[in-house]
Amino acid sequence: MEAMDEASVDMVFADPPYNLQLNGDLLRPNQTRVDGVAEPWDRFADFADYDQFTRDWLTAARRLLKPDGTLWVIGSYHNIYRVGAILQDLGFWILNDVIWRKRNPMPNFHGRRFTNAHETLIWCARGRQSRYRFNYEAMKNLNDDLQMRSDWMLPICTGAERLKLNGHKAHPTQKPEALLHRVILASTEVGDVVLDPFFGTGTTGAVAKKLGRHYIGLERAARYAKLARERLSKLGEAADASLLTTVSKRHQPRIPFGWLVERGLLAPGDILYDQRRRHSAKVRADGTLVSADFKGSIHQVGAYLQKAPVCNGWQFWCMEVEGKLVSIDVLRQQLRAQTH
């Protein structure tokens, strides 16, 4: 990381060692061994040693991030609080902590604690003033037109997605592609550069490639790097960029309601209704509406009739087409396409 150019990446996703502090094998009730994390890379002398390791790689990551870049780091209760404190000490600005709630977690075999059913992701900007990217509409679309929450229910990596060698897990902490899909889609754009300094078997690179992003993966274990190269070489080209991008409504051209009138899509005297036909108003030549006792913009009249503080008139009002109510937002989208 120290050999790379400063401010050269748009996003960092890091799945660092968790410092699990495991002593001995973890056994199931039938005395079979759990295939967990027992690798040298997850062993540290003490907390101070782990903290220094964390500070070093986060310092390098912050140098590599562009001013408006973001960083994601995932961990468990063993390490995530220490990582979070160091993030703040180094000047990162935390935007969210996201809970990855596992659909199928490994049970607690000893029955002495709650089952560890989640991991925590911290999402942060490089600094407090960073103009970071958040693809709000893409996340809302992914969540069935509801705002995406900070608790994500996703399965762990199993089945055909789980890479294996000689019948055993190739990597003990391989993350599911669904998790990286959400992370990368939320905070990058097509063509952005994603850095993973703990690349493992290449999940971040695989998802980045499918989504039309560039990736840099750093992995010092030769066996993992070999598997990552093989995995990535089997992937084809990304889909058309237009299928990988969700245009933010904030960046779409503004269309005043009056344009619909002056361009003949609506006429003075046309009647608009709410979706349940409880309220109605007439269109005026100047692009305002008038109800029985109130006149104003599509937003003001909608709010007045509902006795609400605000109203999105584009979503509230409908026009009648062949006996059916159609949102006036359809007309706005038509004009927006012509303007674009």
Image: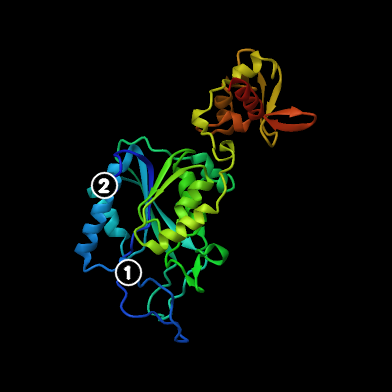
Left or right: residue 86 versus residue 16 is: left
> Which residue occupies the foreground of this view, 139 or 2?
2
Q: Residue lying farthest bottom?
A: 30
Task: Report helix, strand or loop for mark 1.
Answer: loop
Asked where in the image residue 92 lies, by quadrant, the reply is top left
Looking at the image, tell me whether mark 2 or mark 1 is earlier in sequence order: 2
Residue 268, percent from left and from top: 69, 15
**Real-space CA distance between mark 2 and mark 1, rounded to the nearest whole angstrom:** 27 Å
In this rendering, the count of numbered labels is 2
Which residue is located at x 66 percent, y 32 percent?
274
Which residue is located at x 42 percent, y 38 percent?
133
- Label 2 Cα crowd, 10 Å radius (few <14 / some 14-19 / many 20+): few
Which residue is located at x 21 percent, y 69 percent?
45
Asked where in the image residue 239 lies, by quadrant, the reply is top right
> Which residue occupies the foreground of this view, 247 or 219?
219
Residue 13, percent from left and from top: 39, 50
Q: Which amino acid does label 2 sit on?
A: Glu
**Against 7, is 78 above or below?**
below
> Which residue occupies the foreground of this view, 170 or 302?
170
Q: Is residue 151 visible?
A: no
**Against 106, is 31 above or below?**
below
Residue 205, percent from left and from top: 46, 51
Q: Which amino acid does label 1 sit on?
A: Leu
Task: Determine which residue is flagged by label 2.
Answer: 2
Quarter in which the C terminus is drawn: top right
Task: Determine which residue is flagged by label 1.
Answer: 20
**Against 105, is 64 above or below?**
above
Residue 164, percent from left and from top: 50, 68
Pointer 2 with pointer 1, Cβ within 8 A: no
Left or right: residue 106 versus residue 267 is: left
